[in-house]
Image (cartoon, grey):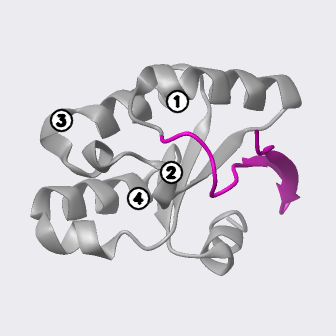
Amino acid sequence: MTMTTLRKIHDVPVLLCPPEGEPIAGERDVLDLIGNASYQGAEWVVVPAGRFDESFFRLRTRVAGDIVQKFANYRMGLVVLGDISPHTVESSALRDFVRECNRGRQTWFVTDDEELTERFKG
């Protein structure tokens, strides 16, 4: 099993998930992740985009909404890290969802570590 890493980014405790690991396909898959992050004192969880099942990027499946809601319920921030442009090119609804998420303080979609660090400067 590949381990998560706790790191502070601009004094914010962030749990970083490795790119390898079980795919995340639903809210049940994130409960252990949220519990682990909470136990370690993280305020945010960073998950590489490649860890999410394809259904996450098809909004009609409601997987993304369910996962985002689960993080919100536990007052834990979620960052989807990586290039998801192949998905956003195909779906205006996903583009709108990403834009709305990135305006808030709960869920962010960022392309790389530099953008991630920049978001936490706030």
Give the magenta range.
1-23
The residue carrying mark 2 is 51
**N-term-proximal mark, 3 vs 1:** 3
Looking at the rendered structure, the kind of residue marked 2 is Arg
Looking at the image, the residue that sits furthest to the front is 1
Report the Cα–Cα distance between label 2 and label 4. Answer: 23 Å
Q: Nearer the viewer, mark 2 or mark 3?
A: 2
Residue 115 x, y percent position in the rendering? 60, 76
Looking at the rendered structure, the kind of residue marked 4 is Arg
Q: Nearer the viewer, mark 3 or mark 1?
A: 3
Q: Nearer the viewer, mark 2 or mark 4?
A: 2
The residue carrying mark 1 is 71
Residue 82 x, y percent position in the rendering? 50, 69
- Secondary structure of the residue carrying tag 3 is helix
**Quadrant of residue 21 in the image?**
top right
In the image, 7 versus 51, the foreground residue is: 51
Report the Cα–Cα distance between label 2 and label 3. Answer: 17 Å
The residue carrying mark 3 is 61
Q: Are marks 4 and 1 in contact (CB under 8 Å)?
A: no
In the image, 28 versus 43, the foreground residue is: 28
Which quadrant would the C terminus be assigned to in this image? bottom right
Residue 103's disc number: 4
**N-term-proximal mark, 2 vs 4:** 2
Residue 119's disc number: none
